[in-house]
Structure formats: C-alpha cells, structure tokens
Image (cartoon, rainbow, N blue to C red):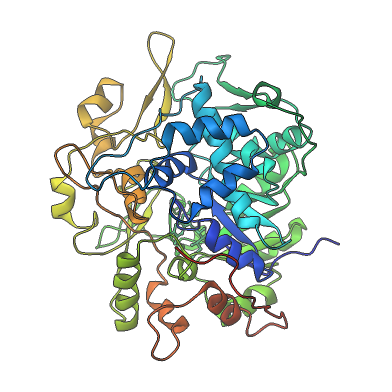
Amino acid sequence: MMQFPKIIQGGMGVGVSNWRLANAVSKLGQLGVVSGTALDSLFVRRLADGDKGGNMRRGLDAFPFPEMAKRIWDEYFIPGGKPVGVPYTIAPMHQRRELRKVVELCIVSNFVEVFLAREGHKNPVGINFLEKVQMPHLSSIYGAMLAGVGYVLMGAGIPLHIPGVLDSFALQHPSEYKLSIIGAVQGQDTAMNFDPADYAEGRLPILDRPSFLAIVSSNTLATTMLRRATGRVDGFVIETPTAGGHNAPPRGKLQLNASGEPVYGERDAVDLAGMRAMGVPFWLAGGYGNAAKVREALDNGAAGVQVGTAFAFTEESGLRPDLKNELLAQAVAGTGVVFTDPLASPTGFPFKVAQIQGSYSDAEVTAARTRVCDLGYLREPYAAPDGNVGYRCAAEPVANYVAKGGKAEDAAGRKCLCNALMANIGHQQTRKDGFIEPALVTVGDDLNTVAQFLAPGRTSYTAADVVESLLSQTAEAVHREPALVATV
Ligand SMILES: Cc1cc2nc3c(=O)[nH]c(=O)nc-3n(C[C@H](O)[C@H](O)[C@H](O)COP(=O)(O)O)c2cc1C
C-alpha cells in the first residue's frame, strides 16, 4: 500500500518553498514541495546573480540534454553576478504559441529545482502550480517529471486537464492543455500543445507518473475533480480561508467586514464526513501548523496536513532574511497583522498580506509605484476582436488594460504580484530610474503562532524543528540528518 506523508510542506511561490526547503522536509520523511510558479524567471535571476554556491550549475550538469542547458547558461549567467542597481534581463513572456527558448527555459528550470530538492535522499518531492498561471503548465510539468517529481499539487482554479497531461507525459506522448480564454467563442481552438519529441536532444526515458493532488476548498470542487478530471486524482488538499497565499472567495455574494476583508460563513465550511465518504486521501490546510491540529486532522480521517506559514520562516526557506526577521519579531511580540485583501491579486482571489512598513502593504509605497507589467504570469488570455488571442493583467497600467477590453474598475487596487513576489525572495527588479520593486509578503492568519518554534534564546528555526513539533502528538518518528548542502 502506498505510504502517504503526514505533513505536506505546502508550495509557496515564488521561490519561498525553494529546492532547499523541500529537500530538508523530504529528507525528514515528509513531503517537501517546491513552488513551480515563475521558476523560469527565478532561474534567470539566480544566474544573473552569479549562481552563488554553484547549485544551478550542478542542476544543469544533471540535465539530460546538455546542449539545451548550455544555451540557457550562455544566455543568462553573469560571472560574479550583475552589478547592484543594474536591472535584471527579462525572459520573454508566456503566450499561447510559445517561443522555443521560453519552453526550454521552463523545462530546464523546473528540472533543476526538482533535481536539487531530490538530491541526497530517496524520498518523494512534490511541485506546486497555480491553475490560474496557465501558459507555463505543459513545459513546467514536463521538466519536473524529467527530474522524477513524485507529486504534482495544483490549486487556484479547477485543474481538470492536468491528470491527463501527467498520464501522457509519463509515456513521453504529446499532450494538450485547453486554455481558458476570456470571450472565446464556441469551437475556438484554445489548446496549447507540447510534444516531448520536439524537445528531445537524446533518447527519451519512460517517466514515472507523479501522484496528483488537487487543492480544493469545498466538497463540490472535490467531487467535480473526481467526476470530470482527464485522469486519476490521487488525493485532495482541503484549504480553508485562514491559509497563507491566495484563498478561495466566499460562496455567494461577496461581503466585506468593517476592515474590508471578505466574510466567510457556514456555507464555506468543508464537510469532512463527505470527504471521508469519497474514499480518496485528503490533507487539511489552513491553520494546521501545530501539534494539536495535526492530531485533530488525523482523528478526523485526514491522511495528514499541509502547512505553509510555519515553513515560510524556516532558515531554509527563500524568504528574504530581513522580511523573515521582521515578521518573526512581530510574531514573538504577538503584534503580527494579516489582512485578507480582496483586491490585491490580479487573479481576483482574496490574497493574504502581512503588514510590513515600507513594503507594498503600505499605501505610500503603493502610491509611489508606477504600474508596469513585464513578467506577465498573471496575464489572462482573451479573444481579441481581430480573432487573435490577446493578454491582459488587471495590475498592468490601467489605460493598457482598458485598451485591451478590461474594465477600469477591475484594475482598481490590484498589485503586481509577479514583481512583488520576486522581491520577497531577494530578486527585486531595479528600474531604470532607480525605483526598486517592493516586497508584498503573504502569510496565513496563523502568523503569530510561529513563535512556538523558536527555542529559548534563538531567533531562527529550521524545517526539522517544525516537522518534529508538528509530529509530536503522533507516533511518527523524525530522522534528523546533517544538512546535505551548506546554506549560501
Ligand atoms: C508564503 C506563502 C506562499 C504561498 N504560495 C502558494 C502557492 O504558490 N501555491 C499554493 O497552492 N499555495 C500557496 N500557499 C499556501 C500553502 O501552500 C498552504 O496551503 C497554506 O500556507 C496552508 O495554511 P497555513 O498558511 O495556515 O499553514 C502559500 C502560503 C504561504 C504562507
């Protein structure tokens, strides 16, 4: 019988749950999950920063097609790193008909992240994607599978097409993904296609089909996935609205409380008896970052829990040290405030935002930023009047958005998550005029409880500290080993 992890360290994009964190968690016998979001752009920035520690190089050396790896290295690596203040080079944005170099970058960067997360142990590693970030899916999943990813986890939408993609790629068969294109007419071809043979620069191995876990917020969504997905759904992560990152919107008409946050009610509660009756393993997420909640989840029939916030502040996570320290200090003082922002994310989903002075959560910082869209992961494809597919993001300059058929009111209050999330992990863009892109940190409502992981006299904690603490009311043992790779 398949052995499931009790703890899934949730995917945290961009680059918060990086290969180093996932490696540490998987090595402890639980499931480490790398974020697959925007890995191509993150890879470009790591190379532009000189690949300190040589980790990207090590991953590239393991890539099965050396010529492809070399093309990327030659284009983006800057020995010693780019000078401070010089803007990063930007890779071309994703689109339905992808440029070959964009696809190659996606395959390679996803391969490297999973390869590094798997180094030095034999336990499975997962990768997390957001269904809403549609266009990189096929090439990213293929790259992750080439590196032997054990689980694919996907939320922020209804990932009906993905299980079938995994089945096809396991056999090295071509696959397609039907984009959701706003305003597409009946019968319009919306498919993106990927054929492994088009990118093979050598013999193609048969790959293992990873397990697929859908991240859902309701029984209805879980049932829909089981009935209509294009292939096997191996389990569910059930995420409640206290979780860090994006949250599902409340059911029914959106109502805001006095602070302007979405109000969730009884209709948003998940029926665990119903979940158990589906006969598919499930993990509970959102406020499960302590031993008592892990015990409670197991007692309620869950296979385990998925935890994000507690892992976001570990020594191994990709979050910038100054932001980590600031939020840890807030947690210790019990003063951390998390705002569920109904507008910030261009996806339209509520997005949890930690309040940090001088960050993008600050109205003054927001006012000082000129809108620009140059990474484009959250651009939505739309059917343009000329019959082509156009792309727009609600956080791009409002006039551009409106010129592309978007409504000005839908652009109000939106923030550029692409640039902000890069800033969260120390890869902030510097603009030509010297403006530095601000950070916007997402964490769960549980922020203040992470102080529990700090031993007396300590100002930091590790992934092993979290895993050990979470499992302390279960019979599961934790095997601590020395870290494989020195931290950079
Ligand atoms: C910093 C951060 C980033 C996150 N990014 C993602 C993401 O990219 N994709 C995703 O599916 N979930 C994301 N999440 C949600 C986590 O995977 C996890 O489900 C959630 O954090 C669990 O609730 P908790 O925060 O109360 O532990 C993120 C959470 C945090 C804290």
The answer to which quarter of the image holds residue 371 is: top left
Counting from the top left corner in percent of width and height, residue 471 is at 63, 79
Q: Residue at x 54, y 72 (%)?
A: 463
Residue 191 as seen in the image, left or right of residue 91 = right
Q: Nearer the viewer, residue 83 or 122?
A: 83
Counting from the top left corner in percent of width and height, residue 33 is at 59, 57
Count how many numbered circles sit on residues in the image.
0
Q: Nearer the viewer, residue 312 or 434?
A: 434
Q: Residue at x 20, y 64 (%)?
A: 357
Q: Is residue 216 visible?
A: yes
Q: Quadrant of the C terminus?
A: bottom left
- Looking at the image, the residue that sits furthest to the top is 386
Vertically, is 467 above or below 13?
below
Residue 482 as seen in the image, left or right of residue 399 = right
Q: Residue at x 71, y 81 (%)?
A: 477
Q: Residue at x 49, y 68 (%)?
A: 311
Q: Nearer the viewer, residue 173 or 132?
A: 173
Vertically, is 340 above or below 291?
above
Q: Quadrant of the N terminus?
A: bottom right
- Looking at the image, the residue that sits furthest to the front is 79
Q: Is residue 10 visible?
A: no
Residue 211 as seen in the image, left or right of residue 448 = right
The answer to which quarter of the image holds residue 209 is: top right
Counting from the top left corner in percent of width and height, residue 398 is at 22, 31
- Looking at the image, the residue that sits furthest to the right is 1
Counting from the top left corner in percent of width and height, residue 427 is at 34, 49
